[in-house]
Amino acid sequence: MLRTITLGSCVSVQGIVVKQLADGKLVVRVDEKTFVGHPVTPHRTA
């Protein structure tokens, strides 16, 4: 599943979900690298 996470206040990464951590963060993989960050919640418009 493809998800977007934030790494700090300005950087976002989109990749394949590897796992979800107990503190709510997601681990995603992009090519050979893994990143840990907070998931971006989808913004729905009415």
Image: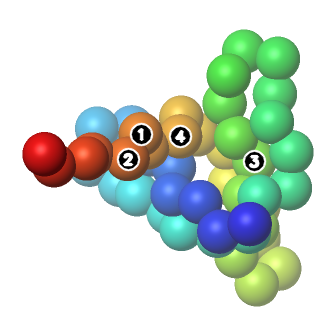
Q: Where is residue 16 in the image (x, y as percent from the top left)?
A: 74, 68
Tag on residue 41?
1
Name the residue type under label 4: Pro
Q: Distance between the residues labelled 4 and 2?
A: 9 Å
Q: Are marks 4 and 1 in contact (CB under 8 Å)?
A: yes
Which residue does the numbered mark 3 point to in the structure image?
27
Q: Do the residues labelled 3 and 2 touch (CB within 8 Å)?
A: no
Residue depth check, mark 4 versus mark 3: number of the one nearer the observer? 4
Q: Quadrant location of the N terminus?
A: bottom right
Name the residue type under label 3: Val
**Looking at the picture, does residue 46 appear above or below residue 35?**
above
Which residue does the numbered mark 2 point to in the structure image?
42
Name the residue type under label 2: Pro
Which residue does the numbered mark 4 point to in the structure image?
39
Residue shown at 80% from the left, 36% from the top: 20
Query: Residue placed farthest to the front in the image?
Result: 46
Q: Position of residue 10 (x, y in %)?
A: 26, 48
Q: Position of residue 12 (x, y in %)?
A: 40, 57
Q: Earlier in the sequence, mark 3 or mark 2?
A: 3
Query: Residue placed farthest to the top in the image?
Result: 23
Residue shown at 37% from the left, 47% from the top: 42
